[in-house]
Image (cartoon, coloured by chain):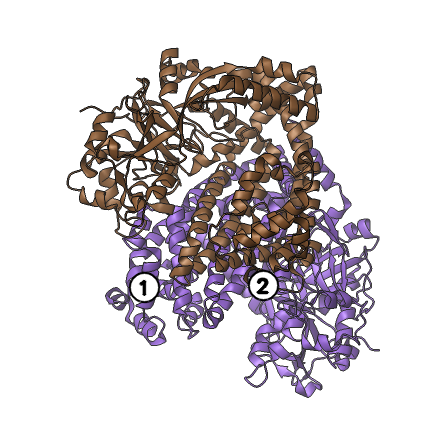
Chain colours: A purple, B brown
């Protein structure tokens, strides 16, 4: 009893803490101005909101940005244009390592296939969508919805410079039509050295204090001229002080804040720790592989980076769930919703035992998890040859079927991308393949047990290393022509193939279908249907008092400049250039970028460099402007701290922090370290 | 609300399940015969209990065993005599690999420094201890208690063949005097090949189904003759059937079933997953090291085995804590105890806010945990050179102090063992040392953050690899003479040493004292004092209705032959020889021991080989006899399943299982595979 009372009291305390007011990734047409007023004494009016929205940009595949001059200059992160910088590099000039500075507009270089968009208008089309789908169920419903969405989008998008999306908010509660202006001629104006943008590497990734100049400047062009952009952000070089109100405008990718407590407990206790153990061990093995020689280090590099980044991301999510107060708050919110549902007979009937259904599905998922992981390996254990063989074996069965009968990943709409990936001539590294496959097989035996029928089928009398070596060394799937022949030859060719990887995967693939069928029937579909009913109840009760989960569309969050505690010690909210130089050891990843090393005597050492704020963000917000209440640019979001990763499940104002570059540091670096005063002047006239 | 009700109902359901009756590692003088009667319709009487107790043995450092013939034959596990078998091996005959079979008693080989004891008598000395310590506090209490214990033990032990221990039960609630008969001439009679005992290796360790002959036979001698042993177990070759009542008599090492829910949540959410992530990564790195060549594989072998075993053990413990029903039961038990305490004004006053004090100490531990891990590294990051340097630096400060003023690990009583370890000429492998140290340093930077003052002090401007290589390669502490000189030279020599490992550890050591002091003051002492009050209340309320936590002394548990569910599938309780042969792949660790490979045609394939039971055991029970209600030997305990490791925190009758070798398999193997029919006949006359 004592404990429950203790928890309840604690959670109550948290709920009534004003800081909770900072939560939310709000749509621009549903922004809670009155909450900001209550917390900070400022209400953004319609003109303010329109100006900020029209000054915000979606950049490239999954980033955010902002217009920062009337001549189409766009500020975003270095890591958002990394791909472009790499593509523009040549053997003679490595722009990733050395950076890029267009002294004149004529020197700006176009980023291939890169676009920038601006959200021009939001229209509520809920009634139209509902009218078109009324009374329909199952497949008929899906088709009717797809038809009305396609019709609405087509009627809206008139040219290459306009894009329209129907956005599904509140998990089906609302449909909005988003109209974007699209710039498809985007040119690189400036990028610092990678080492200036990513000083501190993996140890500092998702951490603070931080000392990164993770910014770049691109310019949008129309008709071959810099685009004239009416709404853009003025820079405020002094930036905010601790406690000041700041906004973040950007496109958070996705959140899952409506998971039930049963699902969260599964994430906390089972899924995340098990993923982290696997990532830890494979990280150790890849380290060992890289130690074997420079060639091994080279081939392992990309996978190592992915594994390290994934490790941090999962670890950060776990931190939120193992925070007692965070978990208690999620439980209290669920209790409150359940009570409201129980008090409303109509809702009660609609929701039924949705929570119970999910809890039982989670228990089934727990029993199925290892079988699913190894029998239907979505990530192909990280092995490219395995992935190729798997796709060829599956396609041989799937492609002859009618489109609607296929597994969804082999539907016509997805085939072009899938085939392009399958036929990519990206290099295959047998030593890396073997290492990843041997680890997966050993782990499979460990987790399913040596007596599991699938383990017996997959391993036979071989050892994990022996099998991995045999199927990798003997395979000729590294050759694109071999893959082409097998794809063209279809079922007959695949069935007849003597390639050991193909032959092995042929025996495994039916096991995947079997467990996947069970998972979809007993877990996935049960959870989806139950979660929809809970979401509908939540929307019926709270309406737009709550923000919708992030969906990769433009959102606005508010917060304040504020540090956070780490291991019981306070972390202050600002760093400065002096800190960067004090921290540089000369050894990777703490070595200075050459331009910054040279500029040490000239740069203002007390200039603030990075800062943290309480804004609620998630992956996809990279490149978002940090904006003060005057609507001026004061910073550039480039990361979250480790706790911000827990934002997938919920926002914790005590520790979730946005990490940004101070705009004053960007201007100082452009002027003093990089000889790019012309761009600084364009952003902030002297 | 729904969820809580759900949990409570579930937990209630579990509490009333009859299987819960199988819980407990009971003392022989406090055995709950009526519970066994209620569950299985059988009450062991005093004669039965005396016979089983006198037939039970404590074997070697930390194992159990049983007397199985009138001529002093003792049955225990192969892994309990592994050290002896290794010591008796020579270059010419590797008894670990090839096994050992004394055809005559004259061929039996004495195990150096090995003893076997039998518990002869238990006397309650609680009153004497309490009388001697009445009214005393703190150090005076400690001294008075030590004095009365020493006096009681000395008065009891009259010769080399008698050992007496005062045992503290119920964490200070009761004191009993245990008198043992001690055999110190112990000779190896039989051991199979290691591969017969450990078939399945790491993948099968702590798992079931299992196919191991993990047994050995030693014989106790007195006056140069096989000892005459009146009480010994008759073998019952047929063994038990599924559902049959069985007992385990042995010496479980230690359990911590009285941790509070706050402590259990910390174990579940923080300590175990973090330990497991570290173990996983170091396991991966060691795998990578071993792949570099046969010499690296050789030097990494021992550490790899330890890491793999620890990984499984921690993983098993975690499984218990992430089981929703298990955790709910612990919470319910705590609630029930708190309610009873609250209802008794005297107890309430005595206990005070013990649970709250522990919860707050746990929160502090959470903040301190990384600092403690790296500033005061108890396991020296696995590096022997680091451990040596640490000991030398600490001893230079500690040894000049008065005994009572020193850190406890440097008290006079502990110095001989400590110095022997320090001066051991066990080989040091620089490449392994570097690998372990580099990993620890990288992890330190990751977990404490690059800006933590200790990280700055420890790493300076070096990389983890660079620093590890410098201090290991430059150190001459691998030479025993160098250590001797530094120990002899004391503070002056250590301060003047230019050895890079010593110089580095000199700078680190004060950070260890600082964090340790804080940990002891704010965590350890708070938890100890509060836990004592809770334990006293528990004993006052439940008395001997509850069994005391395991303390390495003789205990009796009861249960039944029963399978368990794994990943939702039932695991049957028996395996047989046919299963062994079906499972053998010919490749390690699933290759057959030569004797078993040769005997395939002759062994009875349907002979049961291993079995699982619901008995409540823990580490230290290895070698315990499995006994039927007639008091006959039916099996030999050699492991627990993965869930049994959760027995550290509590017993879960649904999944915790004891793993044993069937006595029929032992007899058949002796007779048919090993040409040791004379020993089988001695155990079980034909």
Question: Going 57% across and 74% down the picture, which residue do you hit?
Answer: A83
Q: Are marks 1 and 2 on the same chain?
A: no
Give the CA separation, mark 1 to mark 2. Answer: 41 Å
**Residue B516 - label:** none
Q: Position of residue B552 (x, y in %)?
A: 48, 28
Regarding mark 1 in the picture, which secondary structure is present there?
helix
Which quadrant of the structure image shows residue B21? top left
User: Which residue is tagged 1?
Assistant: A471
Q: Residue furthest top?
A: B46
Q: Position of residue A491 (x, y in %)?
A: 27, 65
Q: Position of residue A91 (x, y in %)?
A: 54, 84
Q: Which chain letter goes with mark 1? A: A
Q: Would residue A524 be visible to someone looking at this image? A: no
Regarding mark 2 in the picture, which secondary structure is present there?
helix
Q: Quadrant of the C terminus of chain A?
A: bottom right
Q: Which chain letter goes with mark 2? A: B
- Is residue A188 depicted above or below B585 in this figure? below
Q: Is residue B139 left or right of residue B643?
A: right
**Residue B470 - label:** 2
Q: Position of residue B355 (x, y in %)?
A: 66, 29
Give the mark count.
2
Q: Would residue A290 be visible to someone looking at this image? A: yes
Which sits in the foreground, A484 or B141?
A: B141
Question: Going 35% across and 61% down the picture, which residue do you hit?
Answer: A468
Q: Quadrant of the N terminus of chain A?
A: top right
């Amino acid at each position: 009893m004592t404990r429950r009372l203790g928890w309840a009291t604690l959670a109550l305390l948290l709920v009534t803490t004003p800081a909770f007011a900072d939560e939310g990734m709000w749509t621009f047409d549903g922004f809670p101005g009155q909450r900001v007023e209550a917390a900070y004494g400022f209400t953004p009016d319609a003109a303010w909101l329109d100006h900020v929205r029209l000054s915000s940009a979606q950049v490239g595949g999954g980033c955010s940005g902002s217009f920062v001059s009337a001549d189409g200059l766009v500020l975003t992160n270095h890591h958002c244009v990394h791909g472009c910088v790499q593509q523009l590099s040549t053997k003679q000039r490595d722009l990733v390592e050395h950076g890029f500075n267009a002294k004149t507009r004529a020197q700006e270089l176009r980023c291939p296939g890169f676009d920038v968009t601006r959200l021009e208008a939001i229209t509520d089309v809920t009634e139209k969508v509902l009218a078109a789908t009324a009374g329909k169920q199952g497949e008929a419903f899906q088709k009717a919805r797809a038809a009305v969405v396609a019709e609405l989008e087509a009627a809206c998008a008139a040219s290459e410079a306009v894009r329209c999306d129907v956005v599904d908010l509140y998990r089906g509660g609302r449909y909005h039509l988003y109209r974007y202006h699209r710039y498809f001629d985007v040119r690189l104006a400036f990028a610092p050295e990678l080492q200036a943008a990513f000083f501190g590497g993996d140890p500092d990734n998702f951490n603070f204090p931080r000392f990164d100049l993770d910014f770049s400047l691109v310019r949008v062009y129309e008709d071959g001229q810099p685009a004239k952009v009416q709404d853009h952000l003025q820079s405020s070089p002094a930036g905010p002080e601790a406690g000041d109100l700041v906004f973040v405008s950007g496109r958070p990718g996705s959140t899952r804040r409506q998971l039930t407590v049963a699902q969260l407990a599964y994430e906390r206790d089972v899924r995340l720790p098990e993923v982290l153990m696997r990532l830890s061990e494979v990280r150790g093995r890849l380290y060992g592989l890289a130690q074997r020689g420079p060639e091994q280090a080279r081939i392992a590099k990309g996978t190592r980076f992915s594994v390290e980044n994934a490790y941090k991301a999962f670890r950060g999510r776990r931190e939120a769930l193992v925070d007692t107060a965070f978990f208690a708050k999620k439980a209290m919110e669920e209790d409150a919703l359940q009570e409201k549902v129980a008090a409303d007979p109509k809702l009660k009937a609609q929701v039924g035992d949705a929570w119970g259904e999910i809890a039982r599905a989670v228990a089934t998922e727990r029993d199925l998890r290892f079988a699913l992981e190894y029998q239907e390996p979505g990530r192909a254990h990280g092995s490219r040859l395995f992935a190729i063989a798997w796709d060829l074996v599956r396609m041989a069965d799937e492609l002859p079927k009618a489109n609607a009968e296929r597994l969804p990943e082999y539907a016509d709409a997805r085939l072009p991308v899938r085939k392009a990936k399958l036929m990519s001539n990206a290099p295959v590294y047998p030593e890396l393949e073997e290492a990843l496959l041997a680890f997966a097989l050993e782990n499979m035996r460990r987790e399913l047990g040596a007596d599991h029928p699938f383990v017996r089928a997959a391993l036979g009398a071989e050892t994990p290393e022996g099998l991995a070596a045999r199927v990798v060394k003997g395979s000729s799937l590294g050759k694109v022509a071999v893959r082409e022949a097998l794809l063209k030859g279809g079922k007959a060719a695949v069935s007849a193939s003597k390639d050991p990887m193909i032959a092995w995967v042929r025996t495994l693939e039916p096991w995947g279908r079997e467990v996947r069928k069970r998972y979809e029937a007993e877990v996935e579909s049960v959870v989806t249907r139950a979660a929809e009913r809970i979401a509908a109840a939540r929307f019926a009760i709270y309406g737009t008092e709550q923000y919708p989960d992030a969906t990769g569309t433009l959102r606005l969050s508010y917060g304040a400049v504020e540090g956070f505690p780490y291991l019981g010690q306070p972390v202050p909210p600002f760093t400065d250039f002096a800190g960067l130089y004090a921290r540089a050891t000369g050894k990777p990843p703490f070595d200075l970028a050459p331009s910054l090393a040279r500029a040490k005597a000239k740069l203002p050492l007390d200039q603030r460099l990075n800062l943290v704020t309480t804004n609620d963000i998630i992956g996809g917000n990279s490149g978002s402007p940090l904006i003060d209440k005057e609507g001026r640019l004061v910073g550039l979001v480039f990361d979250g701290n480790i706790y911000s990763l827990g934002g997938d499940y919920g926002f914790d104002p005590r520790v979730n922090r946005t990490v940004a570059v101070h705009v004053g540091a960007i201007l100082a670096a452009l002027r003093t370290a990089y000889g790019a005063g012309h761009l600084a002047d364009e952003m902030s006239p002297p």
